[in-house]
Structures are given as C-alpha cells and as structure tokens.
Amino acid sequence: MLYIQDTSTDPYFNLAEEEFLLKNMTEDIFRLWRNSPSIIVGRYQNTIAEIDSDYTKEHCISVVRRLSGGGAVFHDLGNLNFTFIQNITPDKSKAAIDPAELFQRFTSPIIEALQSIGVNAELQGRNDLAIDGKKFSGNAICIHKNRILMHGTLMFKVSKTDLSKALKPRPEKFIGKAVKSNVKRVTNISEHLKDKDADILWFTGFLGKYVCSKVKDITPYTFTEDQLNRINHLRETRYSTDQWNFGKSPRYNFTATRRFPKGIVELYLTAEGGLIKDLDIRGDYFFTRPTEEFTRKLIGTPHTRQDIQKKIGTQNLDAYFAGISSEDIVNLFF
C-alpha cells in the first residue's frame, strides 16, 4: 500500500488527484489531504441548490464536484480528508458489493485511532461518523472498473459559521430529482480532546502514523513530475471548470420572487445540464421593451453567476426593468 500525505490545499487539484489515483494507478492507497475553504458537491447533485451563492462568492469559497455520490460537504483547513483506494477481485461484480460493509471496513481504522485518544467515535447510520450523536465525518464511495475509492471528512476544527452559511440549500426554490444534502448537527473532534492545544497538523501526523502502523508493507509515496502534470491537466480541463462543477446538474426548476422599490419581479426558470432551457419573468414592474426579448437572450446560458452577469452586462436593463439594477436582476437567478 502507498501512503500519500498531500501538501496541496487547492480543492481543484486535490479532487483531480482523487480521479488520477483511482483511474491511473494500480496500487492500494491511503491518503490524507486538506482543502482551503470549499464546498464539495456529490456527483449527481444540483450544485446551486446546495449552496448560498452570495456567501460563497463573498468569502471566496470554491465549489467543486467530486466523482463519488452523496451530499455536499464543507471543507476548510480545520478539516482533514482521508481516502482509501483498493483493488477489487475481477470476479466480484458491482451488484455484489455491499456499501454498508465497505463503509464499516474503511472507517474502522479511523474510529480505532480516535478511540485510542479517548474520543468516543462510532459509525452512525449508513455512512456518517459521530461523537455522542453529533456528526463529524461524512463518507462516500466511487467504483471504477476493478478499483474502489472511499473518502471521508474529519472535522477537527472546522468553522461552523462558514459551514452553516455556505452550505445552505434553499429547497423552496428548487424542484427536481437531484440528490439533496442532509445538514445535521455537527461537532469538531477537537472539542472532545483532553489536550485543548492539539491542532490539525498534530492530528494529521497522529492519524497517518496510526493507520500506517496497522498496515503491512505501507510505503510513503511522492508523485513524479509527469504525474503532477497529468493531475494538473485534469484540474484545468475538468475540476476548475463551471461545466463540471455546475453544468453536470440534473434537470430542475427554480423560482424566485423579490419586491423592489420599483416593483415586484417573479422569475421562473428551468435548467437542464446546467443550461437555462426555459425562462419566464412576471411582475408589476415598468418597462419600455418587452420582457420576452430579454428572456430569449438568456436561453442556453449556463446557470452560473459569472455567465449570467456576462450576458446581462451587455444589455440595457433599465429598458426591461425600469429602476431595477442589473445586480438585483442577477441575484434573482440565485
């Protein structure tokens, strides 16, 4: 088994590395890694339904889609991520794999490590780790050919404020078949340690040494320059793109209503594959050009703040929505 303790905190690179390790290497792997503030959404989630777009933009929180399923999670430098990748025997079909057994197997060394320092951690439900009923770890699985990846979060000293405000779904605005996140009561591991001065770097070193001590023939691994280039290529062409992070969302409907000093504006939007397929705007606002002319120009635009700002920035908004700013109209879409 290879042991990788990453120094990169770039979430785009780190998620690209997960795919590279799963699809391009053959060895079993144990990995520890951290991300700068970011929301990591599940493979089949509707990204914008899971986040507070204004908060993530204001606080420079990256949004990245991963390969595995499950719900959205918040990462910052107070969170430690762990990954196990193993080969599966070729004759074992995907249908025969029991996810519950996998979660139990891969989280066992993490639970044992925490219990060895007096933290009463346990597997809760299908794929969460908890302390006294409060969640501190969410885990997910991805299978590629004859290899399986299971990764999870370990909230050591995460900002609960950023977590609660950035990961803030608005279910009343979205109707669709996407996987929804379940935001539960959470806790930090540091709150349950006797040593209140322990930090994330100590915890990373401790967990790495503990797991490595339980595995035979485990070897620290460093990427070659060619491998780093290939991971960076994945980062640039997939994991840092809006098409991957937002455009992979399933079909959904989105509605919003705002009362402005110059009138009420109601927005009804249908998106598919991250693109606006249908858009209808109603209200008692004043205008000098028909609203249909405005909405037609937005059809086919990616449902991301950057793309909508770019498209709206080229238009005379006052003619369509008298006295209402372009910023207010952009905000309606989120």
Image (tube, helix red, strand yellow):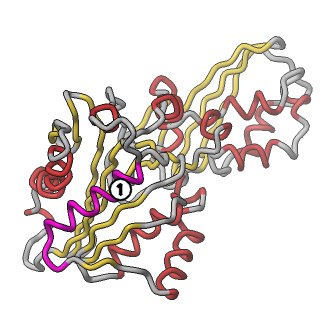
At 15% from the left and 47% from the top, the residue drawn is 116
Give the labeled residue for mark 1. Answer: 204
**In terms of image quadrants, where is residue 287?**
top right
Predominant SS of the magenta segment: helix
User: How far from the left and from the top, in percent, is residue 76?
Assistant: 49, 46
The residue segment tinted magenta is 200-217
**In the displayed structure, does residue 329 sit left or right of residue 69?**
right
Q: Is residue 138 magenta?
A: no
| Residue type at the position of mark 1 | Thr
Please state which of residues 133 and 67 is positioned toward the viewer in this rendering. 133
The verdict on residue 201 being magenta is yes
Foreground residue among 314 and 10: 10
Residue 195, compared with residue 111, is above or below; it is above
Residue closest to the eye, 323 or 22: 22
Q: Residue at x 49, y 30 (%)?
A: 168
Give x and y (percent) for residue 154.
Answer: 33, 46
Q: Is residue 53 above or below residue 6?
A: above
Q: Is residue 169 visible?
A: no
Describe the element under mark 1 as helix, strand or loop: helix
| Quadrant placement of the N terminus | bottom left
Horizontal and vertical percent position of residue 11: 51, 58
Residue at (12%, 62%) from the top-left corner?
A: 95
Image quadrant of residue 53? top right
> In the rendered view, does 71 fall on the left or right side of 54?
left
Task: Give the quadrant of the C terminus.
Answer: top right
Q: Is residue 165 left or right of residue 59?
A: left
